[in-house]
Image (spheres, helix red, strand yellow):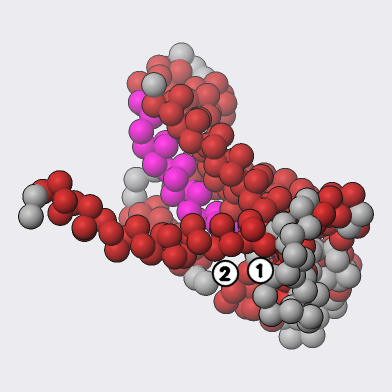
Amino acid sequence: MSDRLLKYLLLLPAILIVVLTTVYPLAFSLITSFRDWDLTRNLEPTGFVGFENYVYALTEDYDFYDAVRVTVWFVVLDVAATVLIALGLAVILRRNGTLHRATRVLLILPFAMSPALIGISWRFMFNPEVGVFTYVLGVLFPWLRGQAWLADPTLAMAAMVSCDVWHWMPYMTLVLLGGLASLPRDSEEAARIDGASEWRVFLDVTLPQLRPVIAVVTILKTVFALKMFDQVVTLTGGGPGNRTATLAYLVYRVAFSAFDMGAASALAWILTAVLIALGAYYMRFLIVKAH
């Protein structure tokens, strides 16, 4: 057997897995988005309806625009909080020392946990009667004592954002630590010799050099936030009302509560189009920076 044929045979299992778990479901859902398929009436897709599912979502479905609004708010708050906290921790943990190295190791623990498990745990800890978060926050802020966090729209959103920030912040911190480690120290030392304070060194020297890494972290976190689903299901259930129902959760609810697979597929592809656009921008950004 030639080496040329062998390399394709070795790649065949991986290609089959990608086709069966990614390419085929995507193609099937795209076709379904142009068809009428109500699981309460038929177990298989029926006739083609063209762009009717997309038109309805974009022009008449008020739940869609509520989900878009919730998703935008969540993404903005989540990405901003994650990047800022991760950047602060990366600057602190940049120093060498036993404590700093141990902290870097411990940082990976939240990211290693299952998102669904995190959501269930945080839901219990926000319990208004026995939740540790509710108790601690009630001690620190007396006006929040006994507050049912997940029953208040604003507090429920804050809880969901905090949960996702806690999950992703360690990973983003490690990425930014890698970026900081790659920066030359000469310019920082020269600024200190010229009398600049540590704050000015960070703002005028370190931060401008770190901007490409921050941009990558921001794009990646935006993609992860847009498709965040597990914590919505396990932490808030989209409530109270629809105030924490993101677009990804709306797709799930339309598919498995309303059983309208055609409309759910159309909603999923609207979200997928946004993710593809962000992914393309991310790849273009990496290629430009590589050159």
- Label of residue 115 in the image: 2
Residue at the spot x=55%, y=45% of the render? Answer: 220
Q: Is residue 110 left or right of residue 251?
A: left
- Label of residue 107 in the image: none
What x and y, as percent, mark residue 286? 45, 32
Q: Residues within 10 Å of mark 1 (few under 14, many from 20)?
A: many
Tell me if residue 127 comes above or below residue 226 in the rendering.
Answer: below
Whether 149 is among the magenta residues is no
Q: Residue furthest bottom?
A: 130
Q: Read off the residue under disc 1.
A: 231
Q: In the image, what residue type sits under mark 2?
A: Pro
Q: Residue furthest front?
A: 47
What x and y, as percent, mark residue 155? 82, 64
- CB under 8 Å between discs 2 and 1: yes
Q: In the image, what residue type sits under mark 1?
A: Gln
Residue at the spot x=78%, y=58% of the render? Answer: 49
Q: Nearer the viewer, residue 227 or 23?
A: 23
Q: Is residue 246 left or right of residue 164?
A: right
Residue 57 quadrant? bottom right
Tell me if residue 222 comes above or below residue 62 in the rendering.
Answer: above
Tell me if residue 26 comes above or below residue 285 in the rendering.
Answer: below
Q: Is residue 215 left or right of residue 47?
A: left
Q: Nearer the viewer, residue 196 or 79?
A: 79
Q: Residues within 10 Å of mark 2 (few under 14, many from 20)?
A: many
The magenta segment = 160-184
Q: Of label 2 and label 1, which has the lower sequence position? A: 2
